[in-house]
Image (cartoon, grey):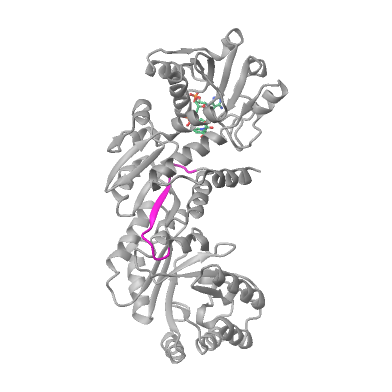
Amino acid sequence: MTKIAAVILVGNAAEAERQARIALGKGADLVELRLDEIVDLGPKTIRHLAKSLGEHAIATNRSPGQGGAQRRGGAPRSALMKEICGQRFAYVDVELEEDGAGLDVLARVAHDHGTRVIVSHHFAEAVEVHRASETLEACAARGDIAKVVTPVADFEAAIQLIDVARVRTDRPRPMILIGTGPAGMVTRALADALDQEIQYASWGNAAAPGQLPLATAARLRGREPIILGLVGHPLGHSLSPLIHETALAALHLPAVYLPFDIPLESLDQFLLAVDRLRIRGFNVTHPLKESLSQRVDELDADAERLGAVNTVVVQDSWTVGHNTDVYGFRVSLRALGLRVGDRTALVVGAGGAARAVVHVLLREGASVQVTNRTIARAEALADSFDDLVAVVPMETLQRAGPWDLLVNATPIGMKGAVAPGLPVPEAIVAKAAFVYDLVYNPTATPLLQAARRLNRPGTSGLDMLLHQAAKAFELWTGQSSPFDAMRRAAKEALR
Ligand SMILES: NC(=O)c1ccc[n+]([C@@H]2O[C@H](COP(=O)([O-])OP(=O)(O)OC[C@H]3O[C@@H](n4cnc5c(N)ncnc54)[C@H](OP(=O)(O)O)[C@@H]3O)[C@@H](O)[C@H]2O)c1
């Protein structure tokens, strides 16, 4: 079973020891003591740390060329490394390049003390997979465990690394092969499945981009991993990872939710790889919702009606597309006690979210009008609903209404969005009895602030987001979602 090492990156030996003990108490099998971070590292400190933590520690003295802070090179480094190898640690990390000349001597000294030798190499830039593979073999030839770390630029590079690790699992020398960065997270999540000797987990600040937090790594340990995630391109900030990680942690499921930044041209390859990567399901975001609806094996009724998928379930290579935005909006209306049957609604926007909203409102029996910046898009939306929807140009809104419900299905008002302000003038907001803003960040959107000024009740899109996430979670895991925990985490993040 892969051992989990919490990486301890602090500048002071006493603090490193204190943090290490807490991490070991929180489920780490090992701690990686980043000795290079400790100011004025000397024999006394090394001996003390070996005595107090050695049997649970990897001693690492990372050089600057390998991403570390140990500036002592040449003879001073050799002396330090000899001191480290001369103590009893569970593992010592020796660098293929920096320590190459004296490596055999260091290994002998370490073995005399019962310490296993990790020979490592960290690439600063992404490299071709054959170079990573050759370097892994070079490390394996010199140590007990071979470790290679390389940045991966995209999902395809991560798959190549995984394939290298997979064909290597029958070799006698254990290995650690890690892709760093968001695209490389899957190489870490599959550490156990790939028989990696050690999973380096973050404790406090991540030592390398993409490291899984200790709690997540501990949840996966020794269990068949379930990979979930968010697919889109580019992946902007999303609350989905936080919401799903909270749910997975609350139920202690052996699963992880990862970012998959997949451009359209890589989508087919991603779908071909889902099984190999143990991906059980994923959410879909801009701009892939429609493209995926054409590529999955099966669609549920809502996804088929809208031609858009925001959740995919994978089972035995069979992909089923769902549209849980529809569910999320419908359930949130109920939760708010909003009855829209025989009522009037104005939907602002004509994109994917607007279509999900219109679909629900029509099904509930509302009379729906749509307005949009690009009127042709509103007309296309109306067309696809057999003209059950009336299109109102923005310029004539002042003559339309009043409405029982106004829904903003544009990003206007969203934090960081290019368009601040209101999706329609305040005089139009005044003609609505209830205001539903699909935007949820900030919680008090400009539109909801306008509604408050006008004494109109309203809601943000947070409940819709949470209900759609809850549905996706249930589809993937077959378990009821811990809704309150998910809501608390999202609200906390939005504060
Ligand atoms: N709460 C939730 O669970 C939830 C779920 C899904 C979506 N959403 C939110 O809903 C919003 C729309 O998502 P979507 O997937 O429908 O996006 P989309 O398919 O890209 O559609 C965007 C819509 O907004 C309009 N728009 C964009 N920028 C505009 C601007 N500067 N001025 C006027 N109109 C503008 C577009 O008009 P044009 O046609 O003229 O380009 C289009 O109608 C997003 O903010 C998203 O975060 C929330």
Task: Determine whether 48 is above or below 312 in the image.
Answer: below
Q: Position of residue 280 (x, y in %)?
A: 35, 49
At 35% from the left edge and 66% from the top edge, which residue is drawn?
131
Camera-nearest residue between 432 and 105: 432
At 63% from the left edge and 36% from the top edge, which residue is drawn?
443
- Quarter that holds the C terminus: top right
Task: Determine whether 181 is above or below 313 in the image.
Answer: below
Is residue 226 one of those drawn in magenta?
yes
Q: Position of residue 334 (x, y in %)?
A: 52, 28
At 42% from the left edge and 16% from the top edge, which residue is drawn?
382
User: Left or right of 311: which side holds 206?
Assistant: right
Count of numbered circles on the image? 0
- Quarter that holds the N terminus: bottom left
User: Left or right of 262: which side holds 272?
Assistant: left
Which region of the structure is painted magenta?
221-235
Camera-nearest residue between 271 and 494: 494
- Residue 232 visible to the viewer: no
